[in-house]
Image (cartoon, rainbow, N blue to C red):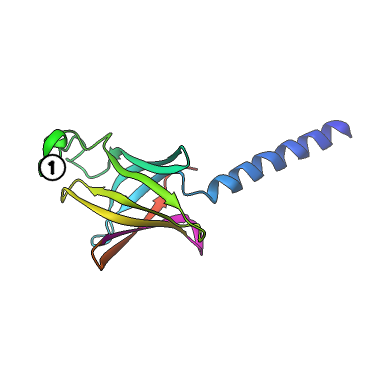
Amino acid sequence: MKKLSQKITLILLFLSVGFMNAQSVFGTWKTIDDRTGKPKGLIEIYEKDGMMFGKILKVLEEGREDVLCVKCDGDMKDKPVVGMHIIKKGEKNDDDEWKGKYLFDPEQAMTFRFKIWLNPENSDELKVRGYLAFIYRTQTWVRAEG
């Protein structure tokens, strides 16, 4: 009986860890182009010192796996897109949204203000909104892990 109780406790522990992970903005996300609906890349979003950061792990577009940031200026000019940090110093607000001033699009070589939140109807979807002045665009990224 004791072994059965230990097994049930262990199973519940694993299930609760998986559930908690599914509720987090942190992890690996597949970016989906909001214009074409096609996957573009894998982004790792992580927390460091209470702030959100994100970097490109992989480009999923066929033939563009080793793409360079040709439109970029300065130190980023002609550097590989893979490994590039595209989200920096996001801060969490009271609405479980993350906001910041650095969401970088290597294709356009532009930096946007951002707001990022989990879709309240599906925690395996991440809403990523970039702002340029009062104009914004929102993409839905999907959880890549699990």
Image location (x, y in percent) of residue 62: 21, 43
Q: Which is nearer the eye, 51 or 63?
A: 51
Q: Which residues are magenta?
A: 119-131
- Kind of residue sitting beneath label 1: Cys
Q: Magenta stretch containing residue 121, yes or no? A: yes
Image location (x, y in percent) of residue 85: 29, 39
Query: Most extreme residue toward the right, as rendered?
Result: 1
Q: Indicate the quadrant where residue 9 lies.
A: top right
Q: Magenta stretch containing residue 71, yes or no? A: no
Residue to which mark 1 is pinned = 72
Q: Residue at x 21, y 38 (%)?
A: 81
Q: Indicate the quadrant where residue 16 lies.
A: top right
Q: Residue at x 18, y 40 (%)?
A: 64
Q: Residue at x 83, y 37 (%)?
A: 5
Q: Is residue 17 above or below residue 117?
A: above
Image location (x, y in percent) of residue 126: 42, 55
Mark 1 burial class by Cα count in 10 Å: few <14, some 14-19, many 20+: some
Query: Most extreme residue toward the bottom, as rendered?
Result: 134
Q: Is residue 112 above or below residue 71?
A: below
Decide if residue 16 is on the left or right side of residue 146: right
Q: Residue at x 39, y 48 (%)?
A: 90
SS majority, magenta: strand
